[in-house]
Image (cartoon, rainbow, N blue to C red):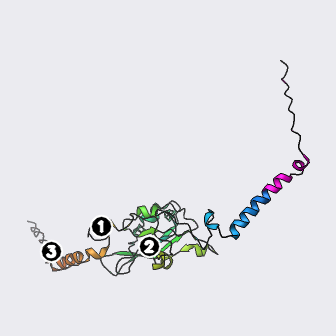
Amino acid sequence: MPAKVVTVTSPTLTFGQRIYFPGILAGLAQTLGHFLKNLLSLTKTLPTIQYPEMRRNYSDRYRGRHILKTRHDGTLKCVACYMCATACPADCIHIVAGEHPNLAYEKYPTTFEIDLLRCVMCGFCVDACPKDAIWMTRDYEMSYFSRKDAIYGIPELTEKPSDTAADGPGYGYRPYYGESPARKAGEFEPSGLAVLPVMLARNAAINRMPPPPKPAAPPAAKPAA
Ligand code: SF4
Ligand code: SF4
């Protein structure tokens, strides 16, 4: 079967259209319009955020830089259980555990480092923590001059007042939002401090217990006849 031939007649362009004149004029008019709008301080109507003077207010669940929470006495809530490091899919948490001088806390991290260049900001570490010790903030300004700078240790990770200041990043992803339900209900926070008196009383009771009786001596063997 012979192919069907379709004849297309191209429109006849004017001289102005052939040298793109109307398009250039329209583009210039658009640019001039934006220029005048900015010049007359009408930027509030524009969707552009004037960073860094202006910042976007991210959600309370934003997963930014981590912080390590502290107890009322200023010590880290972290008990170096390695749950966060085990749950981390990027293998970017490095912890070294030490024995805490306070019996109630048992362990604490002598080293706690997060390599933020490896971190994928998944929040699994926050979910895995049984002590509510690691939260995330809404801080997304993470830029470094060297790889070493991107490894945050305890001094960088410990929560600071500026984290929650009016112009600070504020809290991001965390186990609960607002006041802790346990604290609201008047119950103790998951901190060893609350169980310290119980543990001291238990230790005292153990020390008061009399030593266990010595096992009876085995009967003497009968002399051979
Ligand atoms: S946010 Fe995810 S990748 Fe980053 S340290 Fe936590 S578990 Fe690891
Ligand atoms: S899971 Fe929590 S308590 Fe355990 S090591 Fe990580 S931050 Fe510390």
Task: Please identify the residue farthest to the top as the structure is shown.
Answer: 1
Q: Which mark is first along the chain, 3 or 2? A: 2
Residue under the image location 55 percent in, 66 percent down = 56
Residue at mark 1: 182
Query: Residue 219 appears at what percent x and percent y?
Result: 10, 69
* Mark 2 beta carbon near ligand 2 (under 8 Å): yes
Residue at mark 2: 68
Residue under the image location 29 percent in, 68 percent down = 184
Report if the CB atoms under discs 2 and 3 are less than 8 Å apart. no
Q: Nearer the viewer, mark 3 or mark 1?
A: 1
Q: CA distance from mark 2 to mark 3?
A: 45 Å
Say few, some or many: other residues with alpha carbon within 10 Å of mark 3 (under 14 / 14 to 19 / 20 or more): few
Residue 34 got which mark? Answer: none
Report if the CB atoms under discs 1 and 2 are less than 8 Å apart. no
Q: Which mark is first along the chain, 2 or 1? A: 2
| Amino acid at circle 1 | Ala
Q: Which residues are magenta?
A: 1-26
Image quadrant where one finds the C terminus:
bottom left
* Mark 3 beta carbon near ligand 2 (under 8 Å): no
In the rendered image, residue 39 lying in the magenta stretch gets the answer no
- Per the image, label 3 sits on a secondary structure element best described as loop
Q: Nearer the viewer, residue 59 or 135?
A: 59
| Amino acid at circle 3 | Pro
Residue at mark 3: 212
Q: CA distance from mark 3 to mark 1?
A: 41 Å
Q: Nearer the viewer, mark 2 or mark 3?
A: 2
Image quadrant where one finds the N terminus:
top right
Say few, some or many: other residues with alpha carbon within 10 Å of mark 1 (under 14 / 14 to 19 / 20 or more): few
Q: Which mark is first along the chain, 1 or 3? A: 1
